[in-house]
Image: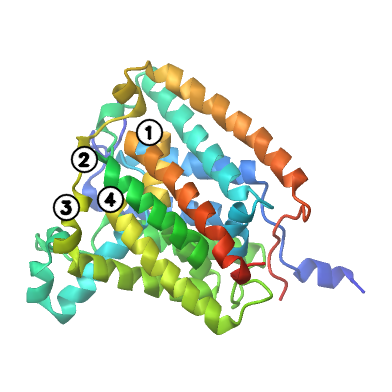
Amino acid sequence: MMAPFLKYGVFGSETSLVVAFLLGIGFGFALERAGFGSARKLVSQFYLDDLAVFKVMFTAIVTAMLGVTYLSWIGFLNLSLVYLVPTNLLPQIVGGLVLGAGFVIGGYCPGTALAATATGRVDALTYGAGLYVGTLLFAEAYPLVKGLHTATPMGQTTIPQYFNLPYGLVVFAVVLMALGGFAGAGWVEKKMATQRTIEPTAS
Amino acid sequence: MVSNTHVSRAPAPYSNPYLAGIGLGLVLLAAFVFVGRGLGASGGVSAVVASGLHAVAPEHAHRLEWLSGRLAGDASPLKEWLVFEGMGVVLGALLSGLLARRAMVVVEKGPRVSRRARLLMAFFGGSLMAVGAAFAGGCTSGQALTGGALLNLGSWAFMLMVFAGAYAVATFVKWQWR
Protein backbone atom coordinates (compact mmCIF):
# COMPACT_ATOMS: atom_id res chain seq x y z
CA MET A 1 0.00 0.00 0.00
CA MET A 2 1.28 3.45 -0.92
CA ALA A 3 -1.80 5.59 -1.32
CA PRO A 4 -3.48 7.80 -0.19
CA PHE A 5 -0.10 9.57 -0.22
CA LEU A 6 -1.04 12.07 2.49
CA LYS A 7 -2.09 9.28 4.87
CA TYR A 8 1.17 7.40 4.28
CA GLY A 9 3.21 10.50 5.00
CA VAL A 10 4.49 11.02 1.45
CA PHE A 11 3.78 14.71 2.05
CA GLY A 12 2.41 16.73 4.96
CA SER A 13 -0.80 18.63 5.56
CA GLU A 14 0.76 21.95 4.47
CA THR A 15 1.66 20.46 1.12
CA SER A 16 -1.81 18.98 0.87
CA LEU A 17 -3.15 22.53 0.55
CA VAL A 18 -1.00 23.02 -2.55
CA VAL A 19 -2.31 19.69 -3.85
CA ALA A 20 -5.84 20.95 -3.13
CA PHE A 21 -5.19 24.03 -5.24
CA LEU A 22 -3.81 21.93 -8.11
CA LEU A 23 -6.69 19.47 -7.96
CA GLY A 24 -9.07 22.44 -7.90
CA ILE A 25 -7.56 23.72 -11.15
CA GLY A 26 -8.30 20.37 -12.77
CA PHE A 27 -11.80 20.33 -11.25
CA GLY A 28 -12.62 23.83 -12.47
CA PHE A 29 -11.14 23.17 -15.90
CA ALA A 30 -13.23 20.01 -16.32
CA LEU A 31 -16.41 21.74 -15.13
CA GLU A 32 -15.99 24.61 -17.58
CA ARG A 33 -15.08 22.27 -20.46
CA ALA A 34 -18.29 20.35 -19.81
CA GLY A 35 -20.33 23.55 -20.06
CA PHE A 36 -21.08 23.66 -16.35
CA GLY A 37 -20.14 27.33 -16.13
CA SER A 38 -23.51 27.99 -17.76
CA ALA A 39 -26.77 27.83 -15.81
CA ARG A 40 -28.70 27.30 -19.04
CA LYS A 41 -26.64 24.24 -19.83
CA LEU A 42 -26.96 22.86 -16.29
CA VAL A 43 -30.72 23.24 -15.91
CA SER A 44 -31.38 21.74 -19.35
CA GLN A 45 -30.95 18.44 -17.56
CA PHE A 46 -34.28 19.13 -15.89
CA TYR A 47 -36.07 20.11 -19.11
CA LEU A 48 -34.66 16.98 -20.76
CA ASP A 49 -33.29 18.56 -23.91
CA ASP A 50 -29.59 18.38 -22.98
CA LEU A 51 -28.63 15.67 -20.49
CA ALA A 52 -24.95 16.64 -20.15
CA VAL A 53 -25.23 16.86 -16.35
CA PHE A 54 -26.21 13.22 -16.10
CA LYS A 55 -23.65 12.10 -18.70
CA VAL A 56 -20.73 14.00 -17.20
CA MET A 57 -21.58 13.13 -13.61
CA PHE A 58 -22.03 9.44 -14.19
CA THR A 59 -19.01 9.18 -16.48
CA ALA A 60 -16.96 10.83 -13.72
CA ILE A 61 -18.43 8.56 -11.04
CA VAL A 62 -17.77 5.42 -13.09
CA THR A 63 -14.24 6.55 -14.00
CA ALA A 64 -13.26 7.32 -10.41
CA MET A 65 -15.07 4.25 -9.06
CA LEU A 66 -13.28 1.91 -11.47
CA GLY A 67 -9.99 3.63 -10.72
CA VAL A 68 -10.46 3.19 -6.99
CA THR A 69 -11.55 -0.43 -7.46
CA TYR A 70 -8.56 -1.43 -9.60
CA LEU A 71 -6.02 0.55 -7.56
CA SER A 72 -7.16 -1.07 -4.33
CA TRP A 73 -7.34 -4.49 -6.02
CA ILE A 74 -3.66 -4.33 -7.00
CA GLY A 75 -2.80 -3.22 -3.46
CA PHE A 76 -1.77 0.33 -4.34
CA LEU A 77 -4.61 2.24 -2.68
CA ASN A 78 -5.81 1.55 0.84
CA LEU A 79 -9.52 2.23 0.43
CA SER A 80 -10.13 2.12 4.19
CA LEU A 81 -8.06 5.33 4.48
CA VAL A 82 -10.18 7.22 1.96
CA TYR A 83 -12.59 9.40 3.90
CA LEU A 84 -16.24 8.41 3.67
CA VAL A 85 -18.86 10.96 4.75
CA PRO A 86 -21.06 9.29 7.40
CA THR A 87 -24.59 8.46 6.34
CA ASN A 88 -27.53 10.21 8.00
CA LEU A 89 -30.31 8.98 5.77
CA LEU A 90 -33.21 11.27 6.72
CA PRO A 91 -31.39 14.63 6.62
CA GLN A 92 -29.65 13.53 3.43
CA ILE A 93 -33.01 12.77 1.80
CA VAL A 94 -34.48 16.09 2.94
CA GLY A 95 -31.27 17.96 2.07
CA GLY A 96 -31.17 16.33 -1.35
CA LEU A 97 -34.73 17.41 -2.16
CA VAL A 98 -34.10 20.99 -0.99
CA LEU A 99 -30.79 21.15 -2.85
CA GLY A 100 -32.40 19.79 -6.03
CA ALA A 101 -35.08 22.47 -5.86
CA GLY A 102 -32.41 25.11 -5.29
CA PHE A 103 -30.47 23.77 -8.28
CA VAL A 104 -33.22 24.41 -10.83
CA ILE A 105 -34.28 27.69 -9.17
CA GLY A 106 -30.75 29.06 -8.78
CA GLY A 107 -29.23 27.47 -11.88
CA TYR A 108 -26.02 26.24 -10.27
CA CYS A 109 -24.64 24.09 -7.52
CA PRO A 110 -21.85 25.42 -5.28
CA GLY A 111 -18.93 24.06 -7.36
CA THR A 112 -20.34 25.03 -10.74
CA ALA A 113 -21.19 28.50 -9.39
CA LEU A 114 -17.48 29.03 -8.67
CA ALA A 115 -16.64 28.02 -12.24
CA ALA A 116 -19.40 30.27 -13.59
CA THR A 117 -18.35 33.26 -11.48
CA ALA A 118 -14.79 32.81 -12.69
CA THR A 119 -16.00 33.04 -16.29
CA GLY A 120 -18.08 36.17 -15.71
CA ARG A 121 -21.62 34.90 -15.05
CA VAL A 122 -23.28 37.61 -12.98
CA ASP A 123 -26.13 35.33 -11.89
CA ALA A 124 -23.54 32.97 -10.41
CA LEU A 125 -22.33 35.86 -8.30
CA THR A 126 -25.76 36.50 -6.76
CA TYR A 127 -26.20 32.73 -6.44
CA GLY A 128 -22.97 32.69 -4.45
CA ALA A 129 -24.24 35.51 -2.22
CA GLY A 130 -27.29 33.35 -1.59
CA LEU A 131 -25.04 30.46 -0.59
CA TYR A 132 -23.37 32.57 2.09
CA VAL A 133 -26.67 33.89 3.40
CA GLY A 134 -28.23 30.42 3.46
CA THR A 135 -25.23 28.98 5.27
CA LEU A 136 -25.35 31.77 7.85
CA LEU A 137 -29.10 31.26 8.35
CA PHE A 138 -28.58 27.54 8.86
CA ALA A 139 -25.84 28.22 11.41
CA GLU A 140 -28.02 30.72 13.28
CA ALA A 141 -31.07 28.45 13.22
CA TYR A 142 -29.10 25.33 14.09
CA PRO A 143 -30.76 24.75 17.51
CA LEU A 144 -34.09 24.48 15.68
CA VAL A 145 -32.89 22.07 12.99
CA LYS A 146 -30.32 20.06 14.91
CA GLY A 147 -32.83 17.28 15.54
CA LEU A 148 -33.31 16.66 11.83
CA HIS A 149 -29.66 17.30 10.98
CA THR A 150 -28.46 14.57 13.34
CA ALA A 151 -31.36 12.13 12.79
CA THR A 152 -30.90 8.52 11.62
CA PRO A 153 -27.11 8.27 12.03
CA MET A 154 -25.78 5.14 10.31
CA GLY A 155 -22.05 5.83 10.44
CA GLN A 156 -19.66 5.39 7.54
CA THR A 157 -21.32 2.83 5.33
CA THR A 158 -21.32 1.86 1.69
CA ILE A 159 -23.99 0.22 -0.45
CA PRO A 160 -22.08 -3.10 -0.51
CA GLN A 161 -21.68 -3.02 3.29
CA TYR A 162 -25.26 -2.06 4.02
CA PHE A 163 -26.87 -4.60 1.68
CA ASN A 164 -24.17 -7.19 2.35
CA LEU A 165 -23.25 -7.50 -1.31
CA PRO A 166 -19.82 -8.15 -2.85
CA TYR A 167 -18.08 -4.83 -3.66
CA GLY A 168 -17.26 -5.94 -7.20
CA LEU A 169 -20.85 -6.86 -7.91
CA VAL A 170 -22.10 -3.39 -6.96
CA VAL A 171 -19.36 -1.79 -9.08
CA PHE A 172 -20.41 -3.95 -12.02
CA ALA A 173 -24.08 -3.06 -11.48
CA VAL A 174 -23.28 0.68 -11.37
CA VAL A 175 -21.31 0.40 -14.63
CA LEU A 176 -24.22 -1.42 -16.31
CA MET A 177 -26.69 1.13 -14.93
CA ALA A 178 -24.57 4.01 -16.21
CA LEU A 179 -24.24 2.46 -19.67
CA GLY A 180 -28.01 1.90 -19.75
CA GLY A 181 -28.49 5.48 -18.57
CA PHE A 182 -26.24 6.85 -21.32
CA ALA A 183 -28.20 4.95 -23.96
CA GLY A 184 -31.44 6.18 -22.38
CA ALA A 185 -30.16 9.76 -22.27
CA GLY A 186 -29.38 9.68 -25.97
CA TRP A 187 -32.85 8.33 -26.66
CA VAL A 188 -34.55 11.02 -24.54
CA GLU A 189 -32.56 13.79 -26.25
CA LYS A 190 -33.64 12.48 -29.66
CA LYS A 191 -37.26 12.31 -28.52
CA MET A 192 -37.31 15.91 -27.34
CA ALA A 193 -38.77 18.14 -30.01
CA THR A 194 -36.21 20.92 -29.59
CA GLN A 195 -33.36 18.43 -29.72
CA ARG A 196 -30.78 21.06 -29.01
CA THR A 197 -27.60 21.06 -27.05
CA ILE A 198 -26.96 24.26 -25.20
CA GLU A 199 -24.01 26.06 -26.73
CA PRO A 200 -22.04 28.95 -25.23
CA THR A 201 -23.55 32.41 -25.25
CA ALA A 202 -22.37 34.39 -28.27
CA SER A 203 -21.19 37.82 -27.25
CA MET B 1 -22.13 36.75 -43.19
CA VAL B 2 -19.73 34.59 -41.27
CA SER B 3 -16.16 35.40 -42.06
CA ASN B 4 -13.26 33.28 -40.91
CA THR B 5 -12.12 35.86 -38.40
CA HIS B 6 -15.59 35.95 -36.89
CA VAL B 7 -15.66 32.18 -36.55
CA SER B 8 -12.32 32.11 -34.78
CA ARG B 9 -13.57 34.66 -32.23
CA ALA B 10 -16.83 32.84 -31.48
CA PRO B 11 -16.97 30.79 -28.30
CA ALA B 12 -15.83 27.21 -28.87
CA PRO B 13 -18.46 24.53 -28.37
CA TYR B 14 -18.41 22.62 -25.10
CA SER B 15 -16.49 19.36 -24.85
CA ASN B 16 -18.03 15.99 -25.46
CA PRO B 17 -19.73 15.19 -22.12
CA TYR B 18 -18.17 11.75 -21.88
CA LEU B 19 -14.67 13.14 -22.40
CA ALA B 20 -15.29 15.89 -19.84
CA GLY B 21 -16.68 13.25 -17.48
CA ILE B 22 -13.56 11.09 -17.82
CA GLY B 23 -11.43 14.17 -17.12
CA LEU B 24 -13.50 15.02 -14.05
CA GLY B 25 -13.37 11.40 -12.89
CA LEU B 26 -9.56 11.33 -13.19
CA VAL B 27 -9.27 14.52 -11.10
CA LEU B 28 -11.51 12.91 -8.48
CA LEU B 29 -9.44 9.72 -8.58
CA ALA B 30 -6.27 11.80 -8.14
CA ALA B 31 -7.83 13.39 -5.04
CA PHE B 32 -8.50 9.93 -3.58
CA VAL B 33 -4.95 8.76 -4.37
CA PHE B 34 -3.11 11.88 -3.22
CA VAL B 35 -5.04 12.99 -0.15
CA GLY B 36 -7.56 10.25 0.61
CA ARG B 37 -10.59 12.45 0.19
CA GLY B 38 -12.79 13.62 -2.64
CA LEU B 39 -13.69 16.96 -4.12
CA GLY B 40 -16.10 19.44 -2.56
CA ALA B 41 -17.47 22.94 -2.60
CA SER B 42 -20.07 23.71 0.08
CA GLY B 43 -17.60 23.03 2.91
CA GLY B 44 -15.51 25.89 1.56
CA VAL B 45 -18.53 28.18 1.80
CA SER B 46 -18.99 27.22 5.47
CA ALA B 47 -15.33 27.98 6.12
CA VAL B 48 -15.67 31.45 4.58
CA VAL B 49 -18.87 32.12 6.55
CA ALA B 50 -17.18 31.00 9.79
CA SER B 51 -14.19 33.19 9.07
CA GLY B 52 -16.29 36.22 8.13
CA LEU B 53 -18.55 35.93 11.15
CA HIS B 54 -15.55 35.43 13.40
CA ALA B 55 -14.05 38.66 12.09
CA VAL B 56 -17.25 40.65 12.74
CA ALA B 57 -18.61 39.03 15.90
CA PRO B 58 -16.09 36.56 17.34
CA GLU B 59 -18.01 35.67 20.51
CA HIS B 60 -21.22 35.11 18.65
CA ALA B 61 -19.43 32.96 16.07
CA HIS B 62 -18.02 30.70 18.80
CA ARG B 63 -21.50 30.26 20.25
CA LEU B 64 -22.88 28.88 16.98
CA GLU B 65 -22.61 25.14 17.43
CA TRP B 66 -22.63 24.30 13.72
CA LEU B 67 -19.70 26.62 12.91
CA SER B 68 -17.75 26.58 16.16
CA GLY B 69 -15.79 23.45 15.20
CA ARG B 70 -14.18 25.43 12.39
CA LEU B 71 -13.03 28.06 14.90
CA ALA B 72 -11.65 25.62 17.46
CA GLY B 73 -7.92 25.68 16.63
CA ASP B 74 -5.46 28.54 16.40
CA ALA B 75 -5.35 28.49 12.61
CA SER B 76 -7.72 30.55 10.48
CA PRO B 77 -10.82 28.64 9.36
CA LEU B 78 -9.74 29.65 5.85
CA LYS B 79 -6.71 27.38 6.12
CA GLU B 80 -8.94 24.59 4.97
CA TRP B 81 -8.48 22.07 2.18
CA LEU B 82 -11.72 22.99 0.40
CA VAL B 83 -10.90 26.71 0.40
CA PHE B 84 -7.64 26.06 -1.47
CA GLU B 85 -9.41 23.64 -3.79
CA GLY B 86 -12.05 26.31 -4.46
CA MET B 87 -9.41 28.87 -5.40
CA GLY B 88 -8.06 26.30 -7.84
CA VAL B 89 -11.55 25.81 -9.31
CA VAL B 90 -11.76 29.53 -10.03
CA LEU B 91 -8.39 29.53 -11.80
CA GLY B 92 -9.03 26.29 -13.71
CA ALA B 93 -12.44 27.40 -14.93
CA LEU B 94 -11.09 30.80 -15.93
CA LEU B 95 -8.26 29.15 -17.90
CA SER B 96 -10.66 26.85 -19.69
CA GLY B 97 -13.11 29.67 -20.35
CA LEU B 98 -10.42 31.98 -21.76
CA LEU B 99 -8.94 29.26 -23.96
CA ALA B 100 -12.37 28.55 -25.41
CA ARG B 101 -13.41 32.24 -25.59
CA ARG B 102 -16.35 31.49 -23.30
CA ALA B 103 -15.38 33.86 -20.47
CA MET B 104 -17.63 36.93 -20.68
CA VAL B 105 -19.72 39.10 -18.38
CA VAL B 106 -23.27 37.88 -18.95
CA VAL B 107 -26.42 36.83 -17.11
CA GLU B 108 -27.43 33.24 -17.88
CA LYS B 109 -31.19 33.21 -18.42
CA GLY B 110 -34.03 32.32 -20.75
CA PRO B 111 -35.65 34.83 -23.12
CA ARG B 112 -38.77 35.53 -21.03
CA VAL B 113 -37.23 36.67 -17.75
CA SER B 114 -35.73 40.03 -16.78
CA ARG B 115 -32.14 40.20 -15.63
CA ARG B 116 -33.21 41.46 -12.23
CA ALA B 117 -35.69 38.61 -11.67
CA ARG B 118 -33.08 36.09 -12.75
CA LEU B 119 -30.47 37.54 -10.37
CA LEU B 120 -32.97 37.41 -7.51
CA MET B 121 -33.94 33.83 -8.33
CA ALA B 122 -30.26 32.89 -8.41
CA PHE B 123 -29.86 34.41 -4.95
CA PHE B 124 -32.93 32.56 -3.64
CA GLY B 125 -31.82 29.27 -5.21
CA GLY B 126 -28.35 29.72 -3.74
CA SER B 127 -29.68 30.18 -0.23
CA LEU B 128 -31.96 27.13 -0.57
CA MET B 129 -29.05 25.12 -1.84
CA ALA B 130 -26.88 26.11 1.11
CA VAL B 131 -29.55 24.88 3.52
CA GLY B 132 -29.92 21.62 1.57
CA ALA B 133 -26.16 21.06 1.54
CA ALA B 134 -25.96 21.81 5.27
CA PHE B 135 -28.60 19.20 6.06
CA ALA B 136 -27.00 16.63 3.78
CA GLY B 137 -23.43 17.27 4.86
CA GLY B 138 -22.29 18.16 1.37
CA CYS B 139 -23.39 19.17 -2.10
CA THR B 140 -23.26 17.77 -5.61
CA SER B 141 -19.44 17.62 -5.42
CA GLY B 142 -18.79 16.41 -1.90
CA GLN B 143 -21.73 14.05 -1.70
CA ALA B 144 -23.04 13.06 -5.12
CA LEU B 145 -19.78 12.94 -7.06
CA THR B 146 -17.33 11.90 -4.35
CA GLY B 147 -19.68 9.64 -2.40
CA GLY B 148 -21.10 8.28 -5.64
CA ALA B 149 -17.69 7.01 -6.72
CA LEU B 150 -17.07 5.47 -3.27
CA LEU B 151 -20.51 3.79 -3.27
CA ASN B 152 -21.38 5.74 -0.11
CA LEU B 153 -24.93 4.76 0.90
CA GLY B 154 -26.06 8.22 2.02
CA SER B 155 -24.52 9.89 -1.03
CA TRP B 156 -26.53 7.72 -3.39
CA ALA B 157 -29.76 8.41 -1.50
CA PHE B 158 -28.88 12.11 -1.58
CA MET B 159 -28.11 12.05 -5.31
CA LEU B 160 -31.43 10.43 -6.22
CA MET B 161 -33.23 13.03 -4.11
CA VAL B 162 -31.39 15.90 -5.83
CA PHE B 163 -32.70 14.76 -9.19
CA ALA B 164 -36.17 14.15 -7.70
CA GLY B 165 -36.28 17.61 -6.11
CA ALA B 166 -35.08 19.36 -9.25
CA TYR B 167 -37.50 17.57 -11.58
CA ALA B 168 -40.38 18.22 -9.16
CA VAL B 169 -39.73 21.97 -9.17
CA ALA B 170 -38.56 22.41 -12.79
CA THR B 171 -42.01 23.05 -14.24
CA PHE B 172 -42.68 25.91 -11.80
CA VAL B 173 -39.58 27.85 -12.80
CA LYS B 174 -39.62 27.09 -16.52
CA TRP B 175 -40.33 30.80 -17.20
CA GLN B 176 -36.83 31.46 -16.04
CA TRP B 177 -35.15 29.24 -18.60
CA ARG B 178 -37.38 28.66 -21.63
Residue A11 vs residue A68: left or right?
Answer: left
Where is mark 4, residue-wise?
Answer: A15
Labels 3 and 2 touching (C-beta < 8 A): no
Kind of residue at disc 3: Gly
Image x and y of residue B115, in percent: 58, 82
Q: Quadrant of residue A7?
A: top left
Where is mark 2, residue-wise?
Answer: A152
Image x and y of residue A64, in percent: 46, 35
Q: Quadrant of residue A32?
A: bottom right
Image x and y of residue A82, in percent: 29, 35
Q: Distance between the residues labelled 3 and 1?
A: 27 Å
Label 4 resides on the chain identified as A
Compared to B31, does B96 lie above or below? below
Considering the image in quadrants, where does the N terminus of chain A appear?
top left
For marks 4 and 3, the one nearer the N-term is 4
Residue at left 62%, top 29%?
A: A180
Kind of residue at disc 4: Thr
Kind of residue at disc 1: Leu
Labels 4 and 2 touching (C-beta < 8 A): no
Where is mark 1, residue-wise?
Answer: B150
Residue at left 55%, top 69%?
A: A119
Q: How far apart are marks 2 and 1 (CA)?
A: 21 Å
Q: Distance between the residues labelled 3 and 2?
A: 10 Å
User: What label does residue A118 carry, if any?
Assistant: none
Labels 3 and 1 touching (C-beta < 8 A): no
Kind of residue at disc 2: Thr
Same chain under badges 4 and 3? The reply is yes
Compared to A140, does A195 lie above or below? above
Same chain under badges 4 and 2? The reply is yes
Binning the other alpha carbons within 10 Å of mark 4 as few (below 14), some (14 to 19) or many (20 upward) gives few
Assign a secondary structure to mark 2.
loop
Where is mark 3, residue-wise?
Answer: A147
